[in-house]
Image: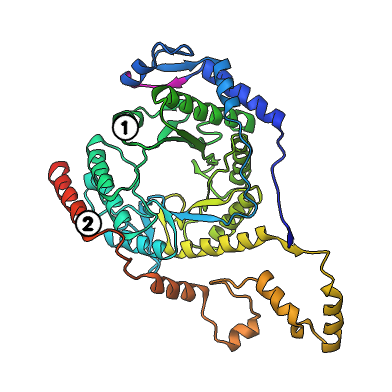
Amino acid sequence: MRHVELRTVIEINQKDIDAVENMAAQLLDKVGLGLDLHEGLQRLAGHPYTRLKNNRVFFDGDYILEILASLHRPLPESANHPLRVSAGGGALDILDHRTSELRKPSMDDLLLTLRVCDRLGLGGDPPVIPADVPMPLRELILFRLAWENTQEFTGRDITTLASGEYIFEMAQVTRKPVNIPLYLINPLRVNSENLALILHFADRLPSLSLSTMPMPGATAPLLAPGYLAQTLAEMIGGYTLLSILFPEKRVLFGSKVLAFNPYSGSIACGSPESLLQGQMEIALLSRYGILPTHFFWSMAGSCDLQAAAERMAGVLMGALAGVRSFGVAGRLQGEAFSLEMLLIDLEIAAYVERLLQGQAWDMQDTAWLSEIQEAIRAGTFLGVSSTAEHYRQEITKPALFTRMTLSQRQANDEKSLRERIQERLQSLNIPPPEYLSPEVKAELSRICRHAEMHLC
């Protein structure tokens, strides 16, 4: 049966994107990428379409336009795809769901958040970073506990050669992939320490990826043509650089435009501007067949009404433009993690997913006439047999939200939303299955003990 669906996209045409591509090529030709890494500069020297000067790499503009043209792709069909939600984000604080206290997370908090997320079928990177683990060991512990306690989670960033060697040793034991993304520093600069790690571990990386996170008005031009051109220059500059250095590797690229609030001097995720900039990002990346991951993000300080309103708006706007992947569920302000917010985010995702399914529309079905006649005789459509079938297909039942009148709530002595969330979290807090064999877990323990002796 056909469904009529909701859709919306921002008003930007292909000539606009052509102009952005030309601006990006000009930026890489005239401004280049900053690269303060001798080994990287050495390996780029002599390439026919690059120039090196004062620790900057300049790319021939026509060469960049050829690469961009080669990357043009149609968008994947996403209309019938379910929303994919991931958690994580490595928050440095946690909003305690029992006391509403904002505090530093512990190892116990990490295990709890991983268990709950795993029971919900989520993946991602660790929701929180435990403050009670010595700094040199944190990166190893994040990978180890993610692999031991979940099916879909992984660790977070690798920042040193020493920790990286131990993490790759653990990855070999568990047969898990490890990625080291290249991060571009805005404006137009390569994270040289990051690239040094990629150069060192390249033969152990199945593929390469890069990302940039400009803030219009702070680390990029405020108006859309400028920040889109810089974003594209950083992405395609990083892509070209990695492709030259590692011609045998597949390279993926993406971006996340972050709104900036000049009145507070901080990011402004969840603001109307962030939604508009996110739609611009979708329009840009769609030329290369990419539907970006958008975030459940708000600058609300707790799991409150502002958080719910801003997160619903962001997910709905992104989904109507075609996005099907939404990350960092449960993350507050980009700084803290909340299990309560996580469950609300999943309720928001289910709400939006139902909207995307649209309304059933079948003009060939003539049963509607007999349905109306039967309902007139019965005095209601509730007694019509086909109505019950349509209910099952068309009407959703939320996991946490309720849709009753005030009198019904009072008559049923209904529990509050927060009480329902608490009960749900308690039911999810159970030990995970044995994802790794005892032998593999013992080997991970041995590697971590060895790392502790040498790193601490």
Residue 395 x %, y %: 67, 71
Please tell me which residue lies in front, 324 or 269: 324
Residue shown at the point (66%, 51%) measured from the top left: 320
Is 115 displayed left or right of 383 in the figure?
left
Decide: is 385 above or below 17.
Answer: below
Is 415 displayed left or right of 108 in the figure?
right
Is residue 94 magenta-colored?
no
Residue 102 x %, y %: 38, 60
Assign the N terminus to one quadrant of the image.
bottom right
Decide: is 62 above or below 150.
Answer: above
Q: To which residue does mark 1 refer?
A: 203
N-term-proximal mark, 1 vs 2: 1
Q: Residues within 10 Å of mark 1 (few under 14, many from 20)?
A: few
* Residue 389 image-quadrant placement: bottom right
Q: To which residue does mark 2 refer?
A: 441
Decide: is 395 above or below 314.
Answer: below
Decide: is 440 above or below 49.
Answer: below
Mark 1–mark 2 Cα distance, whole angstroms, equals 25 Å
* Residue 19 image-quadrant placement: top right
Residue 24 x %, y %: 57, 24
Question: Where does the magenta region start and end?
Answer: 33-38
The local secondary structure at tag 1 comes to helix
* Residue 206 image-quadrant placement: top left
Is residue 35 magenta-colored?
yes
Q: Residues within 10 Å of mark 2 (few under 14, many from 20)?
A: some
Type of the residue with mark 2: Lys
Please tell me which residue lies in front, 74 or 256: 74
Type of the residue with mark 1: Asp
The local secondary structure at tag 2 comes to helix
